[in-house]
């Protein structure tokens, strides 16, 4: 089945630094990838939709200058949390639509900003 | 506006019992209705999915019941096991466009 590989699975960074999260579609081409944020015991909150070769579309309230998304190829999308602060600590998950219109998630990244 | 409403928020079931989670939607254009299972610290994983041309789909202990006229669908977990304890999300989609997720149900199966 379609697999989306997400790295790292967890990261701890100092406040003010930037962190990059990568998502790769391993056996299919993902023209569209979605980035979600999830707080403990809550549902998935869509942050942005990234399309290969074009600018990402951000949901209302999501700071595009803080959460930089790049989708430079059909198999790779990255989310960079810039100048991270403790309130950015969360679980970040990417996903992609597969050829059969299914929806495959990455394994998630637990970001802790100290 | 919440595109899909999920209930209950949490559910406790005895081992061997039946777990039932319900979802309701409004947009009749939706044509794909999956359920995802998420364990702590992991991304959601597709459990089972249904399209509106059938009223029921069964895979092992997991069954989706779909009521097109009522715009509702539900997940039934038969013979629930402690290993089924997880958070379950329903979702809806229109031919692979953006997915809309329910708010999640935390299931605890007591031994």
Image (spheres, rainbow, N blue to C red):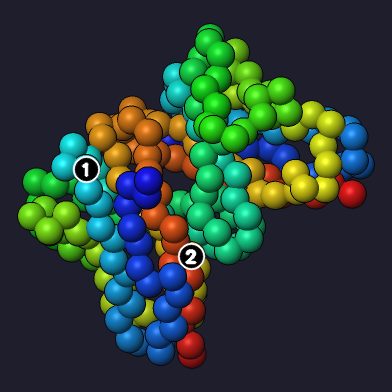
Name the element at disc 2: strand
Relative to residue A16, is residue B66 drawn left or right?
Answer: left
Q: Nearer the viewer, mark 1 or mark 2?
A: 1
Q: In the rendered image, is residue A76 in sight?
A: no
Name the element at disc 1: loop
Q: Where on the picture, by quarter, is residue A70?
A: top right
The subunit letter for the residue under badge 2 reads B
Please tell me if label 1 and label 2 are on a single chain: yes
Mark earlier in primary sequence (1, 2): 1
Q: Is residue B101 above or below residue B19?
A: above
Residue labelled with disc 1: B27
Q: Is residue B91 above or below residue B67?
A: above
Q: Say few, some or many: other residues with alpha carbon within 10 Å of mark 1 (under 14 / 14 to 19 / 20 or more).
A: few
* Residue A50: % across, % down: 52, 22
* Residue B4: % across, % down: 32, 52
* Residue B23: % across, % down: 29, 60
Quadrant of the drawing holding the N terminus of chain A? top left
Q: Nearer the viewer, residue A36 or B38?
A: A36
The subunit letter for the residue under badge 1 reads B
Relative to residue A42, is residue A110 drawn left or right?
Answer: right
């Amino acid at each position: 089945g379609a697999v989306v590989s997400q790295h790292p699975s967890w990261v701890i960074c100092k406040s003010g630094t930037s962190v990059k999260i990568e998502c790769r579609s391993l056996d299919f081409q993902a023209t569209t990838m979605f980035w979600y944020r999830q707080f403990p015991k809550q549902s998935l909150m869509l942050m942005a939709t990234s399309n290969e070769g074009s600018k990402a579309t951000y949901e209302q309230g999501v700071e595009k200058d803080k959460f930089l998304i790049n989708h430079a190829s059909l198999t790779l999308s990255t989310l960079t949390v810039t100048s991270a602060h403790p309130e950015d600590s969360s679980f970040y998950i990417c996903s992609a639509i597969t050829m059969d219109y299914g929806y495959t998630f990455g394994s998630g990244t637990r970001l802790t900003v100290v | 506006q919440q595109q899909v409403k999920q209930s209950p928020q949490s559910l406790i079931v005895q081992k061997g019992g039946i777990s039932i989670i319900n979802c309701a939607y409004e947009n009749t254009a939706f044509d794909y209705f999956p359920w995802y299972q998420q364990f702590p610290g992991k991304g959601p994983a597709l459990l089972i999915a249904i399209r509106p041309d059938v009223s029921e789909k069964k895979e092992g202990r997991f069954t989706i019941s779909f009521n097109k006229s009522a715009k509702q669908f539900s997940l039934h977990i038969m013979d629930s096991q402690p290993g089924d304890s997880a958070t379950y999300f329903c979702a809806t989609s229109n031919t692979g466009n953006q997915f809309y997720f329910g708010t999640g149900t935390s299931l605890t199966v007591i031994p």
